[in-house]
């Protein structure tokens, strides 16, 4: 029986993927084999010795101590793309609000509640509506920084709205590149994109290389009167530099999903309380994907969408399987196989994958190893974790 601990509110639809015959799921589970979470900041004290996998119902993972998990051989899994449509739709809502002053005009109409007849109301509305005149986004240029699951969808939607789309992503994967419409103009320099875009939207992960990617210097490259949208991560933007750019009208507006105290008093900063993935559909999609990946790892050792271990998928050929996490150093696989050979254990199938300093092995064997044989593998220098299914 696998013990699974949940943090945050995980959709029941996702937890239904974990059958009660195999899994005991609880927010209070002691010494869990697996953890499913959303935004909970996972502490090192919560990485108990039995913990095998952390599955994040979302794409970001800055709330998880990934390096420490790697040292302990714990797989960290994420769910890229599961909430992409939800975030895309919120970006489009912000884009349309930015162009048509919907929020400001709504606030103006609500301020007329002291008028008690339609004639007075219509007169007041007609007299003031000019100040809320907007612009159509058709024909305008949208600059997208980050062309992954969400950025690619935003690009497709913007093209459908007859916008011109520029894209900047130096880390674009081959799979993501295939999904980008050929009408998107790829730009190799971020400052060139900023200088040409009337609207700019951010869709990069938070890495050391992207922290404060939008800063005082890059903001100087922006067109005067441009609008910045950030539904990715708050620390991608230098908030103080952003606040100054909004005050001096270098930027006409900012729409962000990460409220900051320094932005609250600015009329041209529109902030939402981290709603990007807050739809019923996105929460269900993320939970289902997180549960499916967790169960495949715990039951078969397969790894999908990990941020610290290599993707490893091997169909089962026998009931007995070894999963071994080890340092990616020479002769490791040979030492492991020599132990199996010495004990006359037959290898029916295997897969060895590496990711930077870490290697991962799935080995289907016959017969299963005894406890002292497993210990012999664990004692090999460089082996981090051994598990038999």
Image (cartoon, grey):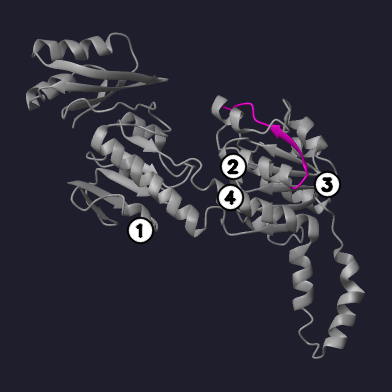
Density class for disc 4 (Cα within 10 Å; few <14, some 14-19, many ≥20) is: many
Q: With 376 as the anchor, is 176 left or right in this view?
A: right
Question: Which residues are drawn in magenta?
Answer: 161-173
* Marks 2 and 3, how far apart at CA: 27 Å
Camera-side mark, 3 or 1: 1
Q: Earlier in the sequence, mark 2 or mark 1?
A: 1
Residue where numbered disc 1 is placed: 12
Residue where numbered disc 2 is placed: 150
Residue where numbered disc 3 is placed: 250
Quarter occupied by residue 54: top left
Q: Earlier in the sequence, mark 2 or mark 4?
A: 4
Q: Answer whether labels 3 and 1 touch (C-beta < 8 Å).
A: no
Within the magenta stretch, is there residue 168? Answer: yes
* Tag 4 secondary structure: helix
Q: Earlier in the sequence, mark 3 or mark 1?
A: 1
Residue where numbered disc 4 is placed: 87
């Amino acid at each position: 029986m696998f013990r699974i601990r949940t943090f945050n509110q995980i959709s029941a639809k996702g937890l239904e993927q974990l059958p009660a015959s195999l899994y005991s799921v609880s927010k209070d589970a002691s010494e869990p084999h697996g953890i499913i979470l959303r935004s909970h900041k996972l502490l090192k004290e919560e990485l108990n010795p039995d913990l095998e996998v952390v599955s994040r119902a979302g794409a970001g993972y800055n709330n998880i101590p990934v390096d420490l998990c790697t040292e302990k051989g714990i797989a960290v899994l994420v769910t890229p793309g599961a909430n992409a449509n939800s975030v895309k739709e919120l970006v489009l809502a912000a884009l349309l609000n930015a162009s048509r002053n919907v929020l400001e005009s709504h606030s103006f109409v609500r301020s007329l509640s002291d008028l008690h007849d339609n004639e007075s109301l219509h007169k007041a509305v007609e007299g003031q509506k000019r100040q809320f005149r907007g612009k159509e986004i058709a024909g305008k240029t949208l600059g997208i920084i980050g062309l992954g699951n969400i950025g690619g969808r935003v690009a497709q939607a913007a093209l459908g709205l007859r916008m011109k789309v520029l894209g900047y992503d130096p880390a674009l994967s081959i799979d993501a590149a295939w999904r980008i419409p050929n009408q998107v103009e790829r730009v190799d320099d971020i400052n060139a994109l900023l200088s040409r875009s009337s609207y700019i939207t951010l869709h990069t992960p938070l890495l050391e290389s992207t922290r404060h990617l939008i800063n005082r210097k890059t903001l100087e490259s922006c067109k005067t009167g441009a609008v910045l949208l950030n539904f990715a991560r708050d620390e991608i933007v230098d908030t103080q530099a952003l606040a100054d750019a909004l005050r001096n009208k270098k930027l006409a507006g900012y729409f962000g999903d990460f409220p900051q105290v320094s932005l609250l008093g600015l009329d041209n900063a529109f902030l939402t309380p981290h709603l990007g993935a807050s739809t019923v559909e996105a929460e269900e999609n993320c939970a289902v994907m997180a549960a499916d990946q967790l169960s495949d790892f715990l039951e078969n050792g397969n790894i999908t969408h990990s941020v610290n271990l290599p993707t490893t998928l091997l169909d089962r050929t026998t009931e007995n399987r070894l999963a071994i996490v080890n340092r990616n150093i020479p002769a490791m696989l040979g030492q492991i196989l020599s132990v199996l050979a010495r004990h006359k254990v037959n290898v029916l199938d295997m897969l060895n994958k590496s990711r930077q300093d870490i290697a991962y092995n799935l080995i289907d064997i016959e017969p299963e190893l005894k406890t002292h044989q497993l210990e012999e593998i664990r004692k090999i220098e460089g082996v981090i974790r051994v598990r038999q299914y």
